[in-house]
Amino acid sequence: MRKIFAGKSKNMTFLGMVVLMSATSVLLNSCNFKNEVNDQVNSQEHPAAENVVTTDDESVDPDKRVIYLTFDDGPNQGTENLLKILDKRNVCATAFLVGKHAYGSNRQKKDFELLKQSPLIELANHSFTHAHNKYTDFYKNANSVVRDFDIAKDSLKLRDMIARTPGRNIWRLNNINVTDIKSSTAAADGLKRAGYKVIGWDLEWRPSQKMTLKGSHEAMLKKVDSIFLNDLEKTSRHLVFLTHDQYLRDTDSINELDLFIEKLQKSNKFVFRKISQYPKINEVLN
């Protein structure tokens, strides 16, 4: 058995890549390259999530791991800085948007348009009201929670049913059922019945009291390695990373996120994907 990634061993077979897709499709969907193909993509209309080719572990080198960069609460202060970092590093991500933020101000409307136009960004649902920041009350009524997400989906014109709950780390897929605060269970189940694929996260880069990124990129890189080494991901070999647009307003935070992504890329241990490529997320919910 061959030893792979930080001493972990897996008996996995790497088969059928060529049969599954062309080499170009693999590159396009891993979002880890910059060449003539990508220049063509950047000139096209923002692709819908439903048109993204879904890939599984067989299309990933067994020595590598998949990271899904996700950013909540946009469009918000820091959204333009986020887009600049992603463009600079040519790496894809998923933006979980709050419906009312997309129309809250002229700047937010502009940032919403920038998000829609970026081929590196996939848009997903983070509710319309963000629970009015009153999470306990919000999750008491499962029907109103579903309505809130439906309003966001319609107002943002989202083409898929991928969602993340505000203030809660909840998962609802066919193969993953996790609720961090049990009083939110009925609301989470209601979202799944309504057809939403609810995605939480494996690692969050939290803020300081000044609402900037807390700690250093070196510390976050160690946490990434630790999660993979100890197999703490919800799905082995796949890590969902979370932070928020509004923490990217100061120079230090911008630089730290930029260095975090740069060093992940340079390590040659990881590939980046949009959340619509997460394993089993496109299965019909049962």
Image (cartoon, rainbow, N blue to C red):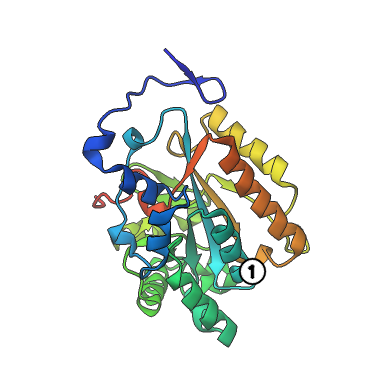
Count of numbered badges drawn on the protein:
1
Quarter assignment of residue 124: bottom left
Q: Residue furthest left?
A: 19
Q: Amino acid at mark 1?
A: Gly
Give the crowd class for mark 1: few <14, some 14-19, many >=20 residues within 10 Å: some
Q: Residue furthest bottom?
A: 106
Q: Residue at x 63, y 42 (%)?
A: 263
Is 69 rendered above or below residue 139? above
- Please give left or right for residue 88 compared with residue 58 in the image: right
* 81 and 219: which is toward the camera: 81
Q: Residue at x 55, y 70 (%)?
A: 74
* 196 and 191: which is toward the camera: 196
Q: Residue at x 48, y 36 (%)?
A: 65
Q: Position of residue 79 (x, y in %)?
A: 59, 69
Q: Position of residue 155 (x, y in %)?
A: 39, 79
Q: Quadrant of the N terminus?
A: top left
Residue 229 seen in the current view: yes
Q: Position of residue 140 (x, y in %)?
A: 47, 65
Residue 198 seen in the current view: no
- Please give left or right for residue 212 compared with residue 96 in the image: right
Q: Position of residue 47 (x, y in %)?
A: 34, 65
Q: Residue furthest front?
A: 36
* Residue ID for mark 1: 78
Tag 1 secondary structure:
loop
